Image (cartoon, rainbow, N blue to C red):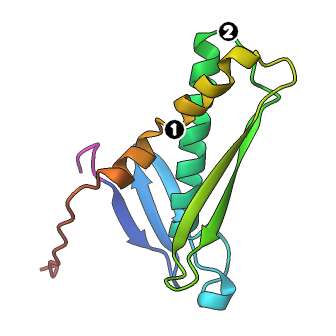
Amino acid sequence: MDEKDIKVTFSGGVKVQAEYKGFKILTDQPVREGGEGTAPSPFDLFLASLATCAGYFVVAFCRERGIPIDDGGLTVRTERHPLTHMIGKMAIKIDLPADFPEKYKNAVVKAADTCTVKAHIFNPPAFEIAAEIKK
């Protein structure tokens, strides 16, 4: 297995586990969808990856400028489209510490906007799916 590969195994019920770069990522489905609710769903991880990616770029921006951000954070609010029931809007609110320099307020928003997960949504990869029966 190449280090770029993500190895997925099925753990019983609707639990699915991924192993990537030495980390094990567990997923399950909510009880209402046939799971046990023991871990985030894959879609929850997708949303969390967007939020934490934006958060990383806020932290990196502040670290580069020596601005303490430990008291900061951000909140992502999702809104579903009424017809498709898919996420139609994600609003990110960055909570900055009281002593955050006003002159960097717009720049930190731009930094969060450079999230690489978001960039992959706007420039999605091609998907190729195949099946192979074990011998």
* Observer-nearest of 24 and 70: 70
Q: Is residue 63 above or below residue 7?
A: above
* Observer-nearest of 77 and 66: 77
Which residue has dot 1 on it? Answer: 113
Spatial separation of the CA atoms under disc 2 and disc 1: 20 Å
Locate residue 27, reporting x and y percent. Answer: 55, 68
Q: Residue at x 21, y 65 (%)?
A: 127
Give the quarter of the image for residue 135.
bottom left
Residues under numbered marks 2 and 1 in contact, where contact means CB atoms less than 8 Å apart:
no
Q: Residue at x 59, y 58 (%)?
A: 90
Residue 64 belongs to the span the image colors magenta: no
Locate residue 86, reporting x and y percent. Answer: 51, 76
Q: Residue at x 46, y 35 (%)?
A: 114
* Observer-nearest of 123 and 6: 123
- Which segment did they paint magenta? 1-5
Q: Is residue 5 above or below residue 130?
A: above
Q: Which mark is residue 1?
A: none
Which residue has dot 2 on it? Answer: 66
Q: Residue at x 58, y 12 (%)?
A: 64
User: Of circles 2 and 1, which is in front?
Assistant: 1
Give the quarter of the image for residue 93.
top right
Main secondary-structure element of the magenta-colored stretch: loop
Q: Secondary structure at mark 1?
A: loop
